[in-house]
Image (cartoon, rainbow, N blue to C red):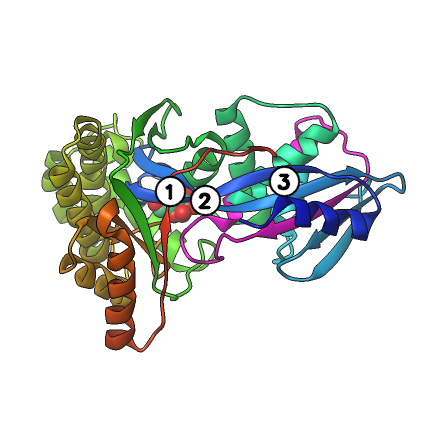
Amino acid sequence: MHDPAVFRTMHKDRFHAEPEIFVGPGRVNLIGEHTDYAEGFVMPAAINFATLAGISPRTDGKIVIYSENFREEKSFEAAALPAKGTKEWTDYPMGVVSILTGEGHKFPGFSLSIWSDVPPSSGLSSSAALEVSTALAVLSLVGASYPGPKLARLCQRAENEFVGANCGIMDQFISVNGKANHALLLDCRDLSFKLAPIPDHIALVIANTMVKHSVAGGDYPTRRRESEAACAIIASHRPGVPFLRDATLEDLAKCGKEMEPKSYLRAKHVISENLRTVAACEALAKGDMKELGRLMNEAHWSYSRDFEGSCVEADTMVELAQDLPGLIGARLTGGGFGGCTINLVEQTEAKKFAEELGKRYAAKTGIKPEIHVCRASDGAHKL
Ligand code: GLA
């Protein structure tokens, strides 16, 4: 992580004021992909890649945001906030300010510095990390706070309504509510959750295929629409199915003939993924790593073949991992179509695993990947 002391000095030098600093982590999803907007289950963990947001008040009525990553400063009038995003990096922090303003907060001018080491467009929720760290920062200015689940919802709304990306609740929720050394099983219907300790002997190895993806891009909303179309057909037979969370594999078998083939496959993934996610949490709680790994591998191929949410590079990364000592389970994590795989690996083998996977992936694809041995970290907080 960026040295907070260096970050503080950077803010002070630029804005001539002492900042308060907040951190919002990225996340890795162990299992449960494209189930959140179907009101199903997900099991992510917050990770030690994060965004820092430093804030200090201003007296000139301006909101000035500086990104150390983009080396760019942008200025807005606090009294005349934009109504919608403009496809710039500032949409994420300004979306948060806009949604919180809609909740009745009146923000005076402020200076906000941003720095992040969450790789963008890599399936590790750089957007949520930025939203959540910004939310804590601006709320601190007006002395306000929210319970974790509510704060996550507000940040999700910033992304849905201001940025214009139709994401579910998973990323913002785990960035707010994550706990060190734990995965979190979230019921995306009522936002109740259970923490499951990740045993010390397990490492989270995150392997970046270097293929970029974006939730705002076309594939994510297309997949979402296809799976929702399948749900509508099931609901026309059995009205108690407003979301795929409520559907069973029997429903799918009965109604499948009426569905577009693609919709059928998307629903097959989502319905089976919900079952796998709950089972994976039980396996983790029991320490049954063999079963957890089996479920992760199955989840990958369901994501790849039925949901068609993977890519050649991610499939290759998962396949190569299978041959390496120490692997418990591997799968593509996050929104799909590129980004990172998550590998649960025996701690003692993790370093060698990461090196070898990197070498084999580069040899096979010609792409140099970034591979990190990570740990599950705490959710957003003040530094
Ligand atoms: C992205 C979205 C999440 C979720 C995942 C897929 O990360 O932001 O809400 O839908 O994709 O599981």
Q: Is residue 371 above or below residue 274?
A: below
Q: Start and end of the magenta stretch?
A: 99-128
Q: Is residue 113 magenta?
A: yes
Residue, x 26% and y 39% (percent of image)?
A: 231
Please name the amino acid that badge 2 sits on. Asn
Depicted 5 relative to depicted 199: above or below: below
Q: Is residue 311 left or right of residue 82?
A: left
Sequence-wise, the earlier of marks 3 and 2 is 2
Percent position (x, y) of residue 364? 23, 75
Q: Are marks 3 and 1 in contact (CB under 8 Å)?
A: no
* Callout 1 amino acid: Arg
Q: Is residue 110 left or right of residue 176?
A: right
**Residue 349 rendering spot, x and y as whole percentages:** 22, 52
Residues at badges 1 and 2 in contact (C-beta under 8 Å)? yes
| Mark linked to residue 375 | 1
Crowd around label 2: few <14 · some 14–19 · many ≥20 (10 Å): many
Question: Count the marks: how many?
Answer: 3
Q: Earlier in the sequence, mark 3 or mark 1?
A: 3
Q: Nearer the viewer, residue 56 or 154?
A: 56
Q: Residue at x 72, y 23 (%)?
A: 143
The image shows residue 301 at horizontal and vertical percentages of 17, 54
- What residue is drawn where x is 89% and y is 38%? 59
Q: Which residue is mark 3?
A: 134
**Along the horizontal axis of the image, is 132 left or right of 42?**
right
Disc 3 residue type (three-letter): Thr
Instruction: State the separation of the CA atoms marked 3 and 2.
Output: 18 Å
Q: Cβ–Cβ below 8 Å for labels 3 and 2?
A: no
Q: Which residue is mark 2?
A: 48
In the foreground, 129 or 308: 129
Which numbered marker is on residue 195?
Answer: none
Q: Is residue 259 shown to the viewer in this render?
A: no
